[in-house]
């Protein structure tokens, strides 16, 4: 007589598989949860400042996601973009120019952005003889990047409007670190510094610099750098990150301090369509 209490070999094999699949899935899920997301921050600040500003954000998002988030950056904007093109970052805070290049390749999607918009500006010494863009012929200009709307292109357009060519009628150099620009003007190594407005009051050192500098001209309003995710990041993580970022409105101690550091009022939900108008404008001025 067949003993029904003892399973056959084939039935035993099926039981083993059924019993171990949930355990396997749990192990895989645990491994995914323990794998850090890499949050890439565009290098407009020095390393120490980047950590001070963005590590609390990484900690907050990690607690919401229940997954470690590793804060990373790069030595300069070119390296940052190269790494982003390689897919090295899961969550990004790129500058607008980098975002547009990544977007056009279908590599990232915007999930949130800071509000309100910001401006670029050109600064000179307080007692300099320069008062209009037309006065800048023959000057030495230090800027962020030839691809930066706030850090170069807007001034290039103003030169054109004044009947000049910025590359022919001025000497342009690019600063390896954005935060060095006002000090290059103060030290006499440049006559004009071009960079983003909200960097103007970053620290006591900048406050002291501001007292000796004068804003010659501002750019039109430019949207804040976006928070974006790489193509292929799972939808559940994207939903949590978007919701968590959109709750940063200054009502918490962390949110208040983080927004104050970035000189913005809040972070709002956004998508790629939120940058369509800016993308069209940027492409037109780049021609």
Image (tube, helix red, strand yellow):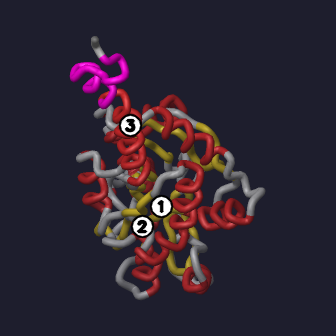
Q: Position of residue 174 (x, y in %)?
A: 31, 67
Q: Earlier in the sequence, mark 3 or mark 2?
A: 3
The reply to whether dot 3 and dot 1 touch (C-beta < 8 Å) is no
Label 2 Cα crowd, 10 Å radius (few <14 / some 14-19 / many 20+): some
**Does the magenta segment cover residue 8?**
yes
Q: Position of residue 92 (x, y in %)?
A: 42, 50
Q: Mark 3 points at which residue?
A: 25
Magenta segment = 3-16
Query: Of 243 and 125, which appears nearest the observer?
Result: 243
Please identify the quarter of the rendering in which residue 38 is found: bottom left
Q: Reply above or below: 25 against 121.
A: above
- Side (left or right) of 180 relative to 102: right
Q: Which of marks 3 and 2 is in front?
A: 3
Q: Which residue is drawn at 30% across and 22% down?
A: 7
Q: Position of residue 194 (x, y in %)?
A: 44, 65
Q: Which mark is residue 136?
A: 2
Q: Please, which residue is most extreme toward the right here? A: 251
Q: Reply above or below: 150 against 122.
A: above
Please identify the quarter of the rendering in which residue 281 is found: top left
Q: Name the residue under label 1.
A: 133
**Quadrant location, the C terminus:** top left
The reply to whether dot 1 and dot 2 touch (C-beta < 8 Å) is yes
The span from disc 1 to disc 2 (Cα, nearest Å) is 5 Å
């Amino acid at each position: 007589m067949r003993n029904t209490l003892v399973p056959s070999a084939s039935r035993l094999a099926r039981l083993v598989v059924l019993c171990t699949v949930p355990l396997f899935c749990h192990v895989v899920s645990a491994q995914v949860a323990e794998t850090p997301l890499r949050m890439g921050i565009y290098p407009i600040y020095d390393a120490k400042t980047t950590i001070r500003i963005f590590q609390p954000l990484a900690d907050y998002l990690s607690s919401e996601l229940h997954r470690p988030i590793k804060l990373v950056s790069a030595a300069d904007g070119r390296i940052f973009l190269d790494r982003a093109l390689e897919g090295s970052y899961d969550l990004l805070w790129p500058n607008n120019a980098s975002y547009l290049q990544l977007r056009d390749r279908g590599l990232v999607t915007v999930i949130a952005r800071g509000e309100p918009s910001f401006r670029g500006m050109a600064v000179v010494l307080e007692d300099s003889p320069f008062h209009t863009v037309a006065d800048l012929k023959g000057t030495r200009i230090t800027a962020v990047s030839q691809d930066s709307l706030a850090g170069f292109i807007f001034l290039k357009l103003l030169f054109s409007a004044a009947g000049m060519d910025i590359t022919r009628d001025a000497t342009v150099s690019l600063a390896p670190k954005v935060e060095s620009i006002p000090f290059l003007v103060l030290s006499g190594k440049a006559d004009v510094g071009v960079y983003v407005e909200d960097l103007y009051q970053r620290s006591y050192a900048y406050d002291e610099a501001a007292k000796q500098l004068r804003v010659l001209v501002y750019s039109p309003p430019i949207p804040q750098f976006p928070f974006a995710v790489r193509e292929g990041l799972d939808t559940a993580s994207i939903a949590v990150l978007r919701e968590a970022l959109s709750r940063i409105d200054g009502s918490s101690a962390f949110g208040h301090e983080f927004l104050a550091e970035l000189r913005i009022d809040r972070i709002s939900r956004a998508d790629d369509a939120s940058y369509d108008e800016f993308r069209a404008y940027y492409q037109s001025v780049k021609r």
